[in-house]
């Protein structure tokens, strides 16, 4: 598959009602581009213009403010030749897309041409000019195929970008077909009408543009509402992630604290437990009980609070006995270890008092 960038001119859009602005320029509604297969005999190609390319946002955006010319400049419009060829411009108003016109089975893009040149205005009003032809560039995808209506084509136009819109003289035949022409009544007035929300309006009138602008704003508001909803959902997800992180951090902190408590407990209990003692699967409370039993302390029927207090007393007293300076002879931890609670506390108090007197 080969793709190349090419320049194209397409003829064949009808014009609608004229309306003048404050500078005397006429506003001419025109259908300027269509879908379907178009014949380019000068290149020997039939080229397909799919709807997703014709109505793409980038392609439609490129149409705003491009020059309007009388016939096609030989090499398109450039800053060097704009003064020579330009007779107006395309309005910046958002173009309409997927428009149906009489005599055509394809969908069109409709925009407003602002024509400021007096001679071209006279030619339009006198019927000496009427068809519209777009000058644009596109990427030509040389992949043949068959369009939805059964027409065979040689290539597909992609990435369509407008350069200018040309108004053609009456002797030029539109590429899009005979229905592409100015239609006026017997007094030379345009007959184009449009119905929006059940209301018939003059095409290109201020009321028509107001309806189009309102529809455009409604679409923008809907898009903003969707964006706001997506942002709120994103913020909600972030809040949940933050809450989960807080819970995870708290869990890690709790684990760290539990490890420190367990480590300190095992250090204190190790002085009394045999070297073969297996701590795996045992609770802190069970280790305290086993340490007291190894120290020959009777904890039968004692509460967990009692066991914890007695363990603390035992290990504190044992640590006291391990000080670098020998304890006084009157202090004998091993002798007092199985005393009653009151005797144990009294013995410990005496030892602490003796230590302070040294």
Image (cartoon, rainbow, N blue to C red):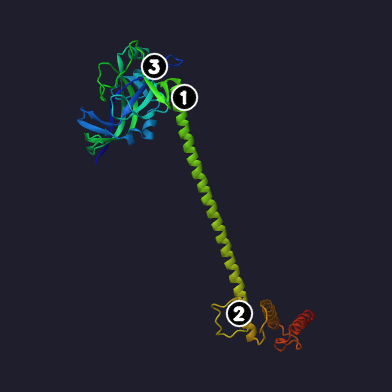
Find numbered disc 3 in the image and state the secondary structure of the residue it sits on.
loop
Query: Who is closer to the viewer here, 298 or 26?
Result: 298
Residue that badge 2 annotates = 287
Find numbered disc 1 in the image and state the secondary structure of the residue it sits on.
helix
Q: Can residue 102 be seen in this view?
A: yes
Which residue sits at x=55%, y=61%?
A: 248
Q: State the image coordinates of residue 192 (x, y, percent, origin top left).
A: 36, 19
Q: Measure the C-alpha gap from mark 2 to mark 3.
A: 99 Å
Q: Is residue 77 visible?
A: no
Q: Measure the C-alpha gap from mark 1 to mark 2.
A: 84 Å
Q: Quadrant of residue 52?
A: top left
- The disc, 3 or 1, on the residue closer to the chain's N-terminal end is 3
Q: State the image coordinates of residue 20 (x, y, percent, origin top left).
A: 42, 15
Q: Quadrant of residue 189?
A: top left
* Mark nearer the viewer, 2 or 3: 3
Query: Who is closer to the viewer here, 327 or 186?
Result: 186
Q: Measure the C-alpha gap from mark 3 to mark 1.
A: 17 Å
Query: Who is closer to the viewer here, 52 or 333?
Result: 52
Residue lying farthest to the top in this orientation: 187
Find numbered disc 2 in the image and state the secondary structure of the residue it sits on.
helix
- The disc, 1 or 2, on the residue closer to the chain's N-terminal end is 1
Q: In this view, does 39 lie to the left or right of 269?
A: left
Residue that badge 3 annotates = 18
Report crowding for label 3: few under 14, some 14 to 19, many 20 or more residues within 10 A (C-alpha). many
Indicate the quadrant containing the C terminus: top left, top right, bottom left or bottom right: bottom right
Labelled disc at residue 210: 1
- The disc, 2 or 3, on the residue closer to the chain's N-terminal end is 3
Residue lying farthest to the right in this orientation: 357
Q: State the image coordinates of residue 321 (x, y, percent, origin top left).
A: 70, 83
Q: Quadrant of residue 215?
A: top left
């Amino acid at each position: 598959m080969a793709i190349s960038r090419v320049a194209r001119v397409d003829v064949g859009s009808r014009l609608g009602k004229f309306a003048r602005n404050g500078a005397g320029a006429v506003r001419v509604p025109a259908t300027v581009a269509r879908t379907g297969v178009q014949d380019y005999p000068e290149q020997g190609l039939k080229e397909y213009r799919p709807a997703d390319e014709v109505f793409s946002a980038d392609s439609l955006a490129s149409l705003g403010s491009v020059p309007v010319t009388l016939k096609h400049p030989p090499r398109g419009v450039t800053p060097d030749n704009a003064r020579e060829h330009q007779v107006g411009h395309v309005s910046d108003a958002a173009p309409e897309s997927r428009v149906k016109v009489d005599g055509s089975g394809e969908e069109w893009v409709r925009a407003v041409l602002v024509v400021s040149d007096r001679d071209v205005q006279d030619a339009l009003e006198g019927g000496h000019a009427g068809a519209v032809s777009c000058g644009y560039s596109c990427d030509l995808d040389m992949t043949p195929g068959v369009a939805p209506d059964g027409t065979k084509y040689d290539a597909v136009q992609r990435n369509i970008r407008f350069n200018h819109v040309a108004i053609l003289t009456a002797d030029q035949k539109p590429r899009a077909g005979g229905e592409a022409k100015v239609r006026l009544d017997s007094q030379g007035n345009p007959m184009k009408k449009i119905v929006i929300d059940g209301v018939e309006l003059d095409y290109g009138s201020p009321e028509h543009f107001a309806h189009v602008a309102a529809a455009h704003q409604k679409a923008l508001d809907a898009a903003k509402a969707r964006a706001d909803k997506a942002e709120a959902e994103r913020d909600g997800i972030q809040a949940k992630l933050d809450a989960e992180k807080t819970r995870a951090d708290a869990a890690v902190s709790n684990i760290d604290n539990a490890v420190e408590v367990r480590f300190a407990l095992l250090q204190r209990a190790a002085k009394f437990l045999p070297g073969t003692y297996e701590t795996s699967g045992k609770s802190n409370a069970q280790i305290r009980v086993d340490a007291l039993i190894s120290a020959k302390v009777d904890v039968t029927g004692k509460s967990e609070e009692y066991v914890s207090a007695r363990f603390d007393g035992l290990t504190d007293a044992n640590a006291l006995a391990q000080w670098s300076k020998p304890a006084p002879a009157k202090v004998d931890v091993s002798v007092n270890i199985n005393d009653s609670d009151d005797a144990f506390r009294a013995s410990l108090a005496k030892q602490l008092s003796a230590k302070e007197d040294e």
